[in-house]
Amino acid sequence: MDFIRQLRIFVTVVETGSFARASDALRIARPGITKAVNELEATLGVRLLHRTTRRVGLTGEGESLYERATALLNDVAAVRNLFGGSADHPVGRLRVDVPVALAKPLLIPALPQFYAAYPDIEVILGVSDQPVDLVADAVDCVLRIGVLPTSSMIARQIATIPMVICASPNYLSRYGTPERIEDLANHKAVNYFSGRGHRPLRWSVSSNADMHELSIPSAMMVNDAEALVACALEGMGLIQVPELLVNDHLSSGRLVRVLPSAWDTQWPLSIMYPNRQYLAPQVRVFIDWIARLVELNRGATLHPV
């Protein structure tokens, strides 16, 4: 296996804290993760990780390699971006990945403005709710909603996004409307999962200035935000989603907001990229542009920081 790829897998194991979570993050089968780390240890002739049934820890040699490996992987990403023109006239390809919830409501309608300002940048836009390895997938930057895992990547929070809990009128007529957080235990949800593990994302609910994380029983699980909304529209359960994704449905009455005590729940919106020091011009102007776009869209569904 390629040495750089082995280093990337090793760094991901360290940052996620387990082989299983690294498998989910990189979308590589668990045996492939184990094999890569074993081969790396054999190549270097040292033991890099202490393995237990619950988690992994770094040996002294592993700590040294982790520091050097993260720097090396950042340099690899920087080499890809050497030919991006100048700060005044950026050119070249820009690989961006954004969540489904942001693509159609926010980013795509504004892209003509970006092209007008930077006509020599070719945007390669990935729209996905699944984890992306910026180095492995040759992605320059990603937008992400929610609390980010520990990573060697640079993360810049640019806004918070109000989250709403809602359901179709049909669902609420059959199962009732939850009035308190405790009522959620008696309802079914369409839950969201990300990665290979099929573990549903826990709901974050605000109550009396305290934030609670809840696991709501699933009627169904999906890994795409638009599919999540579609299931709710068909009356399959409650959902918790970014407000900007369901605004039109809430206005039309096809979905109904519930649980007023949780309406002030907000998730962070961040932009991630490999290295601040070696950002190519096209990446830097896009990061600044998306931050301005969020500021211009300040309102009920986006709160710039």
Image (cartoon, rainbow, N blue to C red):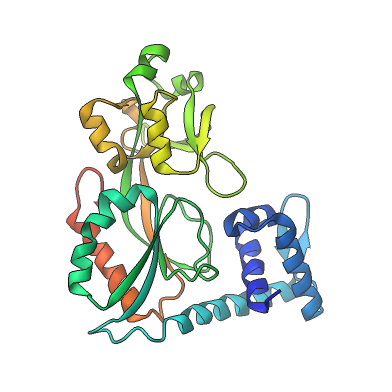
* Quadrant of the rendering where the C terminus is positioned: bottom left
Q: Quadrant of residue 295?
A: bottom left
Q: How many marks?
A: 0
Residue 275 located left or right of residue 242: right
Q: Point out residue 163 in the picture as x, y percentages from the top left corner.
A: 34, 39
The relative height of residue 226 versus residue 130 in the rendered view (above or below) is: above
The residue sitting at 72% across, 61% down in the picture is: 32
Q: Point out residue 161 in the picture as x, y percentages from the top left corner.
A: 32, 47
* Quadrant of the rendering where the N terminus is positioned: bottom right
Q: Nearer the viewer, residue 64 or 233?
A: 233
Q: Nearer the viewer, residue 112 or 200?
A: 112
Residue 91 located left or right of residue 146: left
Q: Nearer the viewer, residue 21 or 220?
A: 220
**Taking the image as drawn, is residue 111 in sight?**
yes
The residue sitting at 61% across, 77% down in the picture is: 69
The residue sitting at 64% across, 64% down in the picture is: 14
Q: Quadrant of residue 56?
A: bottom right
Q: Point out residue 228 in the picture as x, y percentages from the top left corner.
A: 42, 36
Residue 164 located left or right of residue 18: left
**Taking the image as drawn, is residue 177 in sight?**
no
Q: Point out residue 210 in the picture as x, y percentages from the top left corner.
A: 41, 36
Q: Quadrant of residue 249?
A: top left
The residue sitting at 68% across, 72% down in the picture is: 6
The relative height of residue 92 versus residue 263 in the rendered view (above or below) is: below
